[in-house]
Image (cartoon, grey):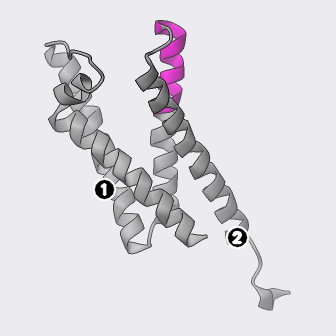
C-alpha cells in the first residue's frame, strides 16, 4: 500500500508545488495560460499570492512526507483538504457564476480525482492500521 501512497503524494505534491509557485510568483502567467487577464488590483493579487503560498507550503510538506516516508497520513489528509476545498469552491462558483470554460472543468475534474484518490488511500490505510496483529489472535 505504501508505494501507492507515495505515488499519490508525489503527484499531489507536483501539482501543489506548480500551482503554488505560479500563484505566488507568476499569477499573470498562470492566468495568461488560460487566455485570461489578471486585473490590476492589489487586493486580488494579494489574495492570489497568499493562497499560493499556502498551496506551496502544503506541497512542500506533502513532498517531504513522500520523500521521507514519514507523516504520510497527515500528508494524505492535507492533500484531501486542499483538493476538496478547491473542488468544493469550484462547485460553489458554478452555482454563483455559471459554467466555466473547458480548461477549468478539466482542473475541477482533476481536483476531484485527487480527492477520490486520497479518500481511497486513507480508507485502505485505516483498515490496515486498525487490523489486529497476527500474534494477538
Q: CA distance from mark 1 to mark 2?
A: 27 Å
* Mark 2 surroundings within 10 Å by alpha-carbon count, few (fewer than 14), some (14 through 19), many (20 or more): few
Name which residue lies at 29% across and 33% down.
Answer: 51
Q: Are marks 1 and 2 in contact (CB under 8 Å)?
A: no
Kindly identify which residue carries mark 1.
60
Is 48 part of what is drawn in magenta? no
Residue 2 visible in the snapshot: yes
Question: Residue 104 at what x, y percent from top left?
Answer: 43, 24
The correct choice, above or below, for 51 with respect to 120 in the image is above
The quarter of the rendered structure image containing the C terminus is bottom right
**Left or right of 58 in this view: 97:** right
**Left or right of 30 in this view: 73:** right
Q: Nearer the viewer, residue 114 or 119?
A: 114
Q: Nearer the viewer, residue 31 or 73?
A: 31
Q: Is disc 1 placed on a helix, strand or loop?
A: helix
Segment colored magenta = 86-97
Question: Residue 6 at what x, y percent from top left?
Answer: 48, 66
To which quarter of the image does residue 115 belong?
A: top right
Kindly identify which residue carries mark 2.
128
Question: Residue 28 at what x, y percent from top left?
Answer: 17, 25
Name which residue lies at 19% across and 17% down.
Answer: 43
The correct choice, above or below, for 30 with respect to 9 in the image is above
Q: Nearer the viewer, residue 45 or 2?
A: 2
* Mark 1 surroundings within 10 Å by alpha-carbon count, few (fewer than 14), some (14 through 19), many (20 or more): some
Name which residue lies at 52% across and 52% down.
Answer: 77
Q: Earlier in the sequence, mark 1 or mark 2?
A: 1
The quarter of the rendered structure image containing the N terminus is bottom right
Amino acid at each position: 500500500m505504501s508505494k501507492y501512497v507515495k505515488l499519490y503524494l508525489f503527484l499531489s505534491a507536483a501539482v501543489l508545488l506548480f500551482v503554488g509557485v505560479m500563484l505566488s510568483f507568476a499569477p499573470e502567467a498562470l492566468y495568461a495560460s488560460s487566455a485570461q487577464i489578471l486585473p490590476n488590483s492589489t487586493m486580488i493579487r494579494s489574495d492570489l499570492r497568499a493562497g499560493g503560498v499556502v498551496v506551496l507550503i502544503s506541497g512542500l510538506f506533502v513532498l517531504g512526507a513522500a520523500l521521507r516516508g514519514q507523516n504520510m497520513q497527515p500528508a494524505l489528509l492535507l492533500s484531501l483538504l486542499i483538493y476538496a476545498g478547491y473542488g468544493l469552491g469550484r462547485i460553489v462558483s458554478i452555482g454563483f457564476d455559471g459554467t466555466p470554460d473547458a480548461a477549468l472543468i478539466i482542473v475541477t475534474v482533476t481536483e476531484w480525482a485527487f480527492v477520490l484518490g486520497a479518500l481511497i488511500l486513507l480508507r485502505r490505510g485505516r483498515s490496515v492500521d486498525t487490523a489486529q496483529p497476527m500474534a494477538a489472535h
